[in-house]
Image (tube, helix red, strand yellow):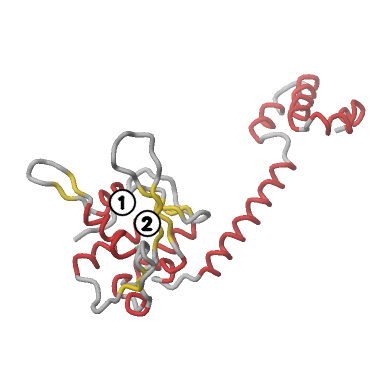
Amino acid sequence: KPVFNPPKNEKKRSNFICYAMKKASEIDVARSRLNYTLLAIDPKTGNILPRFRRLNEHRACAMRAIVLAMLYYCNIDSNLVEASIEKLADECGLSTFSDSGNKSITRASRLISEFLEPMGFVKCKKKKTQSTSNYIPKKIFLTPSFFMLFHISQSTINQYLSGQKKLLKNLKIKEKKIFISFSDIKIISKLDEKSARNKILNALINYYTASELTKIGPKGLKKK
């Protein structure tokens, strides 16, 4: 019974990723109507793959776990899953070990290559490596169909991204308006007038570009 267990001490995920993971956990993504209605396309030939039955329970369980893992590691700006298939397998409990101790990630890799990719939920690109090993890791990208599994449209994603861009723009504007930090203000408040003026002057010089300082001039800088 695979279950996604996110690693401890990881950085906090964005509000959108938390929202998407909540939506995905509230619906059975392995029994979604999309599994019946979407046409599976063979990524190698482009031919339609006929589907006559739903997923077996083993693969359905694996899918429920790995969808959450992919969301957790998804960079929403690029839709890239920032985790290897091996990492996804390990954290979803999909890795198996032989009697001799050899690890296998077949349950996860086959789910991706034989179902999620042909169904159009993900796109995989081989990642070039300078290593002499034959193993070439894949980059996994989530498609709009992936998010539609739990009823999140592309317009919802675009709306979130647009809001993030506006937020970042506003933050940059606010940062531009602040030439001195609050910690420096505390230090300056304890200095004598001459030392305080010098510290503020240095802060202003570091804040403006050379061309801006030229336009301001010595008198303008002294006034500021």
Q: In this view, does 133 lie to the left or right of 213?
A: left
Residue 210: quadrant of the picture:
top right
Instruction: Identify the mark at residue 116; answer none if there is no mark.
Output: none
Residue 76 placement (x, y as % from top left) = 49, 56
Give the residue drawn at x 47%, y 52%.
75
- Quarter in which the N terminus is drawn: bottom left
Residue 66 placement (x, y as % from top left) = 31, 59
Residue pointed to by mark 1: 88
Give the residue drawn at x 23%, y 78%.
53
Residue pointed to by mark 2: 70
Q: Is residue 4 or residue 87 the one in the foreground?
A: 87
Give the residue drawn at x 15%, y 42%.
102
Residue at disc 1, secondary structure: helix
**Gap in angstroms between the C-alphas marked 1 and 2:** 7 Å
Residue at disc 2, secondary structure: helix
- Quarter in which the C terminus is drawn: top right
In the depicted structure, whether residue 17 falls above or below residue 202? below
